[in-house]
Amino acid sequence: MHNNVLILDFGSQYTQLIARRVRELNIYSEIKPFNKLPEDLSDYKAVILSGSPSSVRSEQAPHPDLSEIKGKKPLLGICYGAQYLSHFNGGNVAPSATREYGRANLSFVKNDEEFLKGLHQGSQVWMSHSDTIKELPKGGVRLASTHDVENAAFKIDGETTYGIQFHPEVYHTTDGKKLLENFLVNIAGLKQDWTPDAFVETTVEELKKEIGDDKVILGLSGGVDSSVAAMLLHKAIGDHLHCIFVNNGLLRKNEFESVLDQYKHMGLNVKGVDASARFLDALKGESDPEGKRKIIGRVFIEVFDDESHKVENAKWLAQGTIYPDRIESVSASGGPSAVIKSHHNVGGLPDYMKLKVVEPLKMLFKDEVRRVGASMGMSPEILGRHPFPGPGLGIRILGDITAEKVAILQEVDAIFIEGLKKWGLYDKVWQAGAMLLPVDSVGVMGDERTYEKCVALRAVESTDGMTADWVNLPYEFLQKTSNDIINKVKGVNRVVYDISSKPPATIEWE
């Protein structure tokens, strides 16, 4: 591809958001750590410098060599990136007299400037800095100001180099997307041709070339990522893709059967393996959360390995890994910190499984995965499915796990999830589920005293699971759901609703 945007990450919490906003313009972008500049820059038609928790005035300030970029390619510095362009090119960056965080409004916008086309005086922007540009770099021309920041935007004469001291990638900057479009389309001349259909077409051709007639094994989870990865591979290699869907005994009610049925209608070559007894036996007596995770992971590997040996001459292992799992981010200390995690279904496969890895979704964000799936005609029911943890109900049953506890929680969870769907709330929630607590409480049913379990319901809204807030579900819905659970699920006499956010709490209880 020769229509790419390179985003250099200086450690900003918003760097991934820059990439997402660029891709929303149907322009492909990649994130690289500032200290791992690609040797070959010919594939990139524009470069964006991210923000950073660092100060350019610090001796430890991130300081890459931009000699092959500045003045040679369209370049946009955001916040720290703008201060970097000033500080190291004859300008002056100093501590701000009034630290500016949050909403601000443009008080001056230079007329007839292509970069600011569509932005007007009074336009809202989002600030997040304690330093400010006192003097512009050599050749710098002021383009915009706020009441407190004189040099909110600038350009360098004779170059397609721009700097802004606000964040166009966050929604609080009202015209941020328009500004990025001005820079990338009107100034850098990039084409807006990176669409889900184009991705499918290109990826299928690449998979055909890479895999040829080899066989591929993929561990399906029933979730969005592995399902979309399976469909892409199926388009490329057909029945040479062998999907394995393992029932670990900790899935939702009837999920093993319903997911297999969904996949049957998608034309996939899927084998369902019911290993629930094996998992529950291995988990017997274990109540430590980390201990349970390790057991579930180990037994999954054993089952997956057993089944993969039944596929003769398999050469590849497919994973539903997505871009946020692979991005190397930059730590606040200035060094790159790897934040790569494995897909939960096949993470940590042993070395003796000598399979090459193929990851069709490795450059996509979650919302892009859904759009790609939709472009292939996949069911909205699969694409809209809430995330579900790899260890399943194993980390929603606090304490040790028994078949009886699993059955109770499956019934509770089914009532909750079906209720969300009936009330039109399911798609407004990012993730929902029920927890079985290690608490027995006194209750009264009819004229009898009961001493039974307590369950907690949890529903959160989020974009990526890194942070989350509890959803304010209607009281009438919670009342109906609570009544249904207590009346229909034997062994439960108390229902509570979790109203804690992440942080400080986590989405799952274990």
Image (cartoon, rainbow, N blue to C red):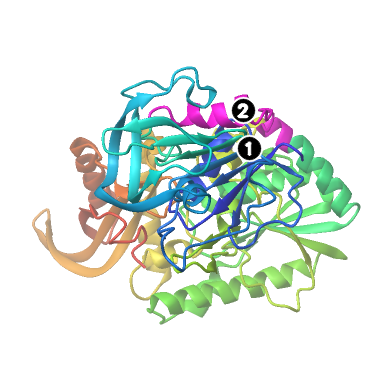
Residue 60 in the figure: left or right of residue 202: left
Taking the view exactly as shown, the residue that stands out farthest to the top is 112
Q: Which residues are magenta?
A: 174-199
- The residue carrying pointer 2 sits among few (fewer than 14), some (14 to 19) or many (20 or more) residues within 10 Å by Cα, namely some
**Other residues around mark 1 within 10 Å, as few (<14) / some (14–19) / many (≥20):** many
The image shows residue 284, relative to residue 482, as above or below, that is below
> Circle 1 is placed at which residue position?
74
Give amino acid for label 2.
Answer: Ile
Work out whether mark 1 precedes mark 2 in sequence or the reverse, and give the earlier one.
Answer: 1
Kindly give the residue lying farthest to the left in the view shown: 447
Query: In which quadrant is the C terminus drawn?
Result: bottom left
Q: Residue at x 54, y 54 (%)?
A: 9
Query: Can residue 25 be seen?
Result: yes
Residue hosting label 2:
187
- Relative image position of residue 288 (x, y in whole percent): 38, 79
Towards the viewer: 105 or 501? 105
Q: Secondary structure at mark 2?
A: helix
Q: Residue at x 60, y 42 (%)?
A: 369
Q: Position of residue 406 (x, y in %)?
A: 41, 64
Type of residue at label 1?
Pro
Helix, strand or loop status at disc 1:
loop
